[in-house]
Image: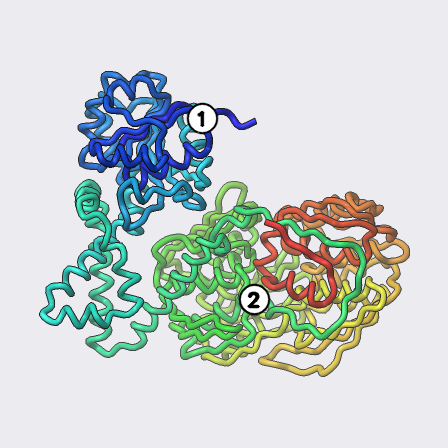
């Protein structure tokens, strides 16, 4: 049962205070009391039902309240605090809504001698250019952020109570350091208001301002809307947050000066860089507001898949572009000389994070638009230091390859990722880089973040990889581009060779002999055209789906069939699958084909260990094929699966057991006995491939399968749900 709200006093019945009071009154508070120095506003608040009772004696009302909300202008905050200090009971919770927290904390110290333990400073990120109690809205804060800035001595009960009040109003409550709050708000709120006031004032002084305002278009109206805000309130805010506002204003002025210089010099490239970075940032801001941004924690909202049992898969499908090739196309295109055009680029969250990281390092990138990207390369030594850490989302590929190419830069850098990536091993790339002379640090337990000191003189090495890993191989080869002499990497088993192929496509010589690949440092990359094939890892889900569902037949178009990636095709064929390669060809140095898959009676097999590195990302789906096969399938030599986005061996074993499949995990693989698949609940552990694998298992299930924690599917296959449903899978997503 939801507990009753406390007796609440709201001091200041403007838009914010009135909306807070009105919303909580509608929630059923025993009594919402209002006080305002303006008697007219107070009477209006009572008439409109914003408050239950109007207080004419502030001190008496404070002494009787359980919670006191100060919603008064910043400039009168000290006077109001001084007035209520003598009658404020120690157990009464005090909070506020001021948009400048440092100033209010200082006021509290002056008035009370120290910041009271029951004082919880707060700031709702919501509002309107309208003001006064008549503009109050009970749902003003719904789906808006509220920032609380508790101090070290803030009482935990008081903090929880204030958080609960805001959450009752539908707000998303965050905690932030006081100084950081004021810096962030100076940039995101105070500066835009300052610029809007300035622009309107400047144009209003123009002698032809009547025509300027008469013919102003939507952009002018949208930007200057906030100039209609309360002048006195913003006057107070700018003075109260003086230092942070001046800092961000200086940064903006420098940016405007760069724009002016570019226009004056006719520097279109500089303008394009500024505009593309700005568009990207604005698009990213829109995604943050809709909860789909790549730099948000991937588990910020739980997406659940619900799969109805049965069905078949049919049609001609084109899955998204290969993620591995998409990453590399941006990386090498950025380091090339000239303009690189990319088609078929995967617009998944991981690939977009890589694209954004290069924008952060000064590379001009147009798009993506319908899979097309244009990269204005800066050359091998043209990258610039980013303003902060480079965020690569959920992508181990991006982080490990970035480590190699950043090791040769002149500037310091730091690589971070989401919660899942932050638990994955990075010493496997840090160690060989250190042996080349790079200064590389990893975080706790050898996991991200990775910090790289710039300016190191790298020397080529002859590196025998202890474990087959295309990411480690690529990392060392990319560092080799910046190293003195030759860098050679020898792998214990074949892994994907996209980096070697693409380097050659960009005109950089790569020598290959047996299990070794080598490069000589000091060369250059030349821009080229890249057509990214469809990702065989994404196509795998439909290969398995069509194989296990009776009556199915699909054609998967333009799929990359790189010899180092076709383990899944070889394994499914060995199990009795009906797969045919059609229209084989080569595009941009990568072999591609259309793949026709028909349903077949699969048989359990001992998976050849030489096929394991060639199908390492596809094994979650292969587990499903094994569960639907007659007999037993044994997987060995796949310990790498335990350090992917999740421990994929354990995740698949646990999920299959939950669905009634007889399976046993081993240190380096699993033993799967084919049989009936029941319905049930599965946890994907935030791993996109686990989620999609159990989704296709529904085709052979006897009951509904519910899959938890599926938001990360967007990292590699953003349109999986739509494509799967169009092909015949009965799949719904919730959350």
Task: State which quadrant residue 278 falls in.
Answer: bottom left
Q: 215 or 588: nearer the eye?
A: 215
Residue 38 in the image, given as x and y percentages of width and height:
20, 34
Residue lying at 36% horizontally and 61% vertically, measured from the top left: 410
Looking at the rendered structure, the secondary structure element under dot 1 is loop
Residue 153 in view (yes/no): no
User: Marks 1 and 2, how far apart in space?
Assistant: 69 Å
Side of 290 relative to 199 (left or right)? right
Residue density around tag 2, few if under 14, some if 14–19, many if 20 or more, within 10 Å: many
Looking at the rendered structure, the secondary structure element under dot 2 is strand
Asked whether disc 1 touches disc 2, contact meaning CB atoms under 8 Å apart, the reply is: no
Side of 523 relative to 703 (left or right)? left
Residue lying at 67% horizontally and 83% vertically, measured from the top left: 585
Above or below, 2 against 549 in this view is above
Colour scheme in use: rainbow
Residue 52 in view (yes/no): yes
Residue density around tag 1, few if under 14, some if 14–19, many if 20 or more, within 10 Å: many
Question: Which label sits in the foreground, 1 or 2?
Answer: 1
Above or below, 682 against 504 in this view is above
Above or below, 556 against 232 in this view is below
Q: Which residue is mark 1?
A: 5
Disc number for residue 488:
2
Side of 26 relative to 122 (left or right)? right
Residue farthest to the front?
47
Residue 458 in the image, given as x and y percentages of width and height:
44, 61
Task: State which quadrant residue 660 falls in.
Answer: top right
Residue 652 in the image, given as x and y percentages of width and height:
73, 49
Q: 504 or 252: nearer the eye?
A: 252
Q: 351 or 129: nearer the eye?
A: 129
Residue lying at 80% horizontally and 49% vertically, measured from the top left: 703
């Amino acid at each position: 049962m939801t507990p009753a709200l406390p007796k609440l006093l709201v001091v200041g019945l403007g838009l914010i205070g009135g909306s807070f009071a009105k919303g909580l009154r509608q929630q059923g508070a025993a009594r919402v009391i209002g006080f305002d120095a303006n008697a007219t506003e107070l009477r209006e608040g009572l008439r409109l039902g914003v408050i239950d009772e109007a207080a004419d004696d502030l001190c008496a009302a404070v002494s009787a309240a359980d919670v006191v909300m100060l919603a008064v202008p910043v400039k009168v905050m000290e006077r109001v605090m001084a007035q209520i200090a003598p009658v404020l009971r120690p157990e009464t919770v005090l909070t506020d809504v001021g948009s400048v927290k440092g100033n209010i904390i200082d006021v509290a110290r002056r008035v009370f001698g120290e910041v009271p333990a029951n004082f919880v400073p707060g700031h709702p990120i919501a509002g309107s250019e309208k003001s006064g109690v008549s503009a109050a809205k009970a749902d003003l804060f719904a789906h808006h952020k509220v920032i609380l800035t508790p101090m070290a001595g803030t009482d935990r009960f008081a903090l929880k109570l204030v958080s609960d009040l805001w959450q009752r109003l539908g707000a998303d409550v965050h905690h932030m350091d006081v100084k950081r709050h004021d810096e962030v708000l100076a940039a995101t709120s105070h500066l835009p208001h300052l610029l809007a006031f300035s622009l309107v004032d400047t144009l209003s002084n123009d002698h032809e301002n009547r025509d300027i305002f008469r013919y102003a278009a939507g952009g002018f109206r949208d930007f200057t809307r906030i100039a209609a805000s309360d002048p006195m309130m913003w006057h107070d805010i700018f003075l109260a947050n003086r230092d942070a506002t001046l800092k961000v204003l200086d940064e903006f002025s420098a940016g405007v000066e760069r724009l002016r210089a570019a226009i004056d010099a006719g520097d279109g490239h500089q303008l394009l860089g500024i505009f593309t970075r700005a568009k990207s940032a604005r698009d990213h801001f829109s995604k943050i507001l809709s909860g789909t941004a790549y730099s948000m924690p991937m588990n910020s909202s739980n997406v659940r898949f619900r799969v109805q049992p049965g069905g078949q898969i049919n049609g001609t499908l084109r899955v998204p572009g290969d993620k591995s090739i998409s990453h590399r196309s941006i990386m090498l295109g950025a380091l090339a000389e000239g303009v690189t055009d990319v088609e078929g680029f995967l617009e998944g969250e991981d690939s977009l994070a890589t694209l954004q990281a290069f924008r952060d390092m000064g590379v001009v990138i147009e798009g993506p638009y319908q899979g097309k990207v244009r990269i204005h390369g800066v050359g091998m030594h043209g990258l610039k230091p980013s303003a902060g850490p480079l965020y690569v989302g959920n992508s181990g590929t991006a982080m490990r390859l970035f480590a190699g190419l950043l090791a040769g830069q002149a500037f310091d850098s730091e690589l971070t990722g989401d919660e899942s990536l932050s638990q994955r091993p990075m010493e496997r790339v840090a160690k060989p880089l250190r042996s080349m002379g790079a200064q590389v640090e990893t975080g706790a337990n050898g996991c991200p973040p990775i910090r790289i000191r710039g300016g190191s003189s790298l020397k080529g090495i002859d590196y025998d990889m202890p474990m087959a890993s295309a990411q480690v191989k690529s990392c060392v080869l990319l560092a080799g581009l910046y190293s003195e002499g030759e860098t050679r990497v020898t792998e214990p088993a074949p892994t994907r060779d996209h980096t070697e192929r693409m380097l050659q496509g960009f005109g950089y010589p790569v020598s290959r002999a047996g299990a070794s690949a080598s490069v000589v440092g000091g060369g250059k990359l030349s821009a080229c055209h890249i057509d990214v094939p469809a990702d065989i890892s994404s196509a795998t889900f439909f290969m398995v789906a069509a194989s296990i569902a009776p009556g199915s037949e699909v054609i998967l178009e333009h799929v990359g069939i790189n010899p180092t990636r076709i383990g899944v095709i070889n394994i499914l064929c060995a199990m009795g699958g009906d797969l045919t390669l059609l229209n084989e060809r080569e595009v941009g140095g990568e072999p591609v084909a259309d793949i026709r898959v028909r349903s077949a009676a699969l048989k359990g097999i001992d998976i050849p260990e030489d096929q394991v590195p060639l199908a390492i990302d596809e094994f979650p789906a292969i587990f499903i094929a094994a569960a639907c096969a007659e007999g037993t399938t044994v997987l060995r030599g796949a310990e790498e699966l335990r350090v992917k986005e999740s421990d994929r061996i354990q995740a698949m074993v646990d999920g299959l057991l939950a669905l009634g499949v007889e399976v046993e995990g081993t240190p380096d693989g699993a033993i799967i006995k084919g049989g009936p698949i029941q319905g049930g609940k599965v946890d994907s552990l935030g791993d996109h491939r686990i989620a999609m694998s159990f989704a296709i298992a529904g085709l052979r299930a006897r009951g509904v399968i519910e899959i938890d924690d599926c938001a990360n599917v967007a990292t590699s296959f953003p349109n999986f749900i739509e494509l799967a449903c169009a092909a015949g899978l009965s799949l719904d997503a919730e959350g």
